[in-house]
Structure formats: structure tokens, C-alpha cells
Amino acid sequence: MTILYVACEGESTEPDYLQYLNEQFGDGDGHDRQPFRIQPVYRRNGLTPGEVVAAACDAAGEDEAWALFDRDQWGDIPQAIKAAAASRIEIVFSHPSFDLWLLLHFQAFGGAQSGSSKLVVEKLRQAKGAEAFKDFDKKGDKSIRAARRNALRNREDKAAEHARTLVSSCSHGLCKPRQAKVDPVEGDDPVTPQQWASRSGHAPDCPILQRDPSTDVWRLLARLRIVKARPLARGDHPG
């Protein structure tokens, strides 16, 4: 069984989603997808990106570790990327927020958000098929349980397709989803923060804070063989 430690910036949405992946896919499929277990690592009131990377490293030990954090208002993201590269902690970065990944289950999305999740959440509440999310982030409820999990089910391939299209559409111009890497790195050769951040499919010289909008959550699902690691159709524009 594959064991992954995934440290999260948030204390509700992301851990709930990771538990959903465990419950829905963790037993494997008897073929390509082997059994896995995600161990969410989080803290009440949340963590900064730098703290997420440190928490992933501390919890995982010799096991595989991923750090899941957002653009939001954080200023320590470059330092977090540097620390992740040094420790080989995989990065799951979303700009502006993890909520974008949820929205991509129901529709495509584009347009820079400058770190604000307001429009993303509004679209999620109104999306066709996402009726369970109509009250998402109202009265502080950002949980992913019951009806919301049911709404996400069987939409993972579509979400990954939309996420890879955002890589292709990056304003940098040389970012391609086929360049993404999802399997663990072998060897101890040093990597730069830019090289490590480019495992998302973005070019090494594409500044991570300018990947707006984007989300790397699909890479975690590709690592677990829940979705394909490569675009579903020819070229860089899947589907």
C-alpha cells in the first residue's frame, strides 16, 4: 500500500477532500490503481505555506510527502518552495485557492483573480450539478462531506482536464501539461526551487505567483492513478 503524508494549509476543506479520496479510491481498483492511504496533516486555524512544508517533512519521515497550499495573501511562498525542493516535498499549489479545484469538477474557468477567491466561490455555488455547494463558505461552512462529496464523485477526470488546460493557457507561453511529473523522484541530485516548481508542467522560469489561475491538485490524483498523468487528447489541450 502507498502511504502519502499530505500537509494542508486549511483545517476543513482540504482534509475533508483527502479523506474523500481515501474512502472513494483508497482500496485500489485491482488493476493500475494500487491501494493507498493519505494521511492528512493539518492544524486548527490553519498553516502558512512554509509551515505546511515543515509539517509535511516532520510527519512523513522517510515516507512520501506532499504540501498543499494556496496563493491567498501569503508572503512566504518562495521560501516554502525552496524548502520543499531541498526536502523533496511535492508541491500542490493553487492560485487563488483550493476552491478552484472544486469548481473545475463542474466547469472550466479562466481569468486572473489576483489572489481573490470571491469569483471562484460564486461560480462554484452557481455551477450546474453543484447544488450541494450553494451554501459553500457561508457561515464558515467549507466542509466537503455528504452531499458535497456525492456531487464531486465521477467528475475527477473532467476536473483534471480543466486543470491541465489552465497550464496550457498560462500567460508565460511555454507551460505544457505534458511536462508535468507525478511519480517520486529517484536519486539525491540537487534541484533548484524553479525546477521543483516546474513539476507542475509550468516552465522553470514561470514565476509561481503569476500562475493565475491554476491548481496542481490534479497531480496528486495522477500520482495515485485516480486520473491519467497525461492529457487525454492530442497536443496540450486535453478533451
Image (tube, helix red, strand yellow):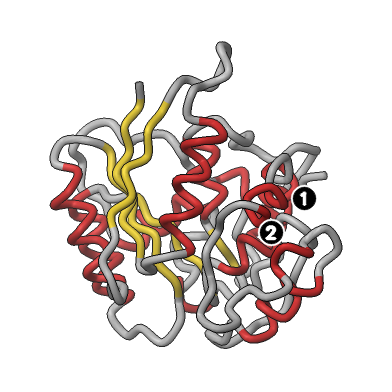
Write down the residue under mark 2: 168
* Residue 207, percent from left and from top: 46, 73
- Do the residues under discs 2 and 1 have CB atoms within 8 angstroms? yes
* Residue 51, percent from left and from top: 22, 69
* Residue 90, percent from left and from top: 35, 50
The quarter of the image holding the N terminus is top left
- Left or right of 90 in this view: 215: right
Write down the residue under mark 1: 237
Q: Residue furthest right?
A: 128
Please name the amino acid that badge 1 sits on: His
What residue is at 57 percent from the left and 87 percent from the top? Answer: 116
Quadrant of residue 204 in the image?
bottom left
* Residue 158, percent from left and from top: 75, 47
Please name the amino acid that badge 2 sits on: Ser
The label shown at residue 130 is none
Label 2's element? helix
Q: What's the distance in space between the residues labelled 2 and 1, CA to CA?
A: 7 Å
Q: Which residue is at the front of the view, 24 or 229?
A: 24
- Left or right of 113 in this view: 129: right
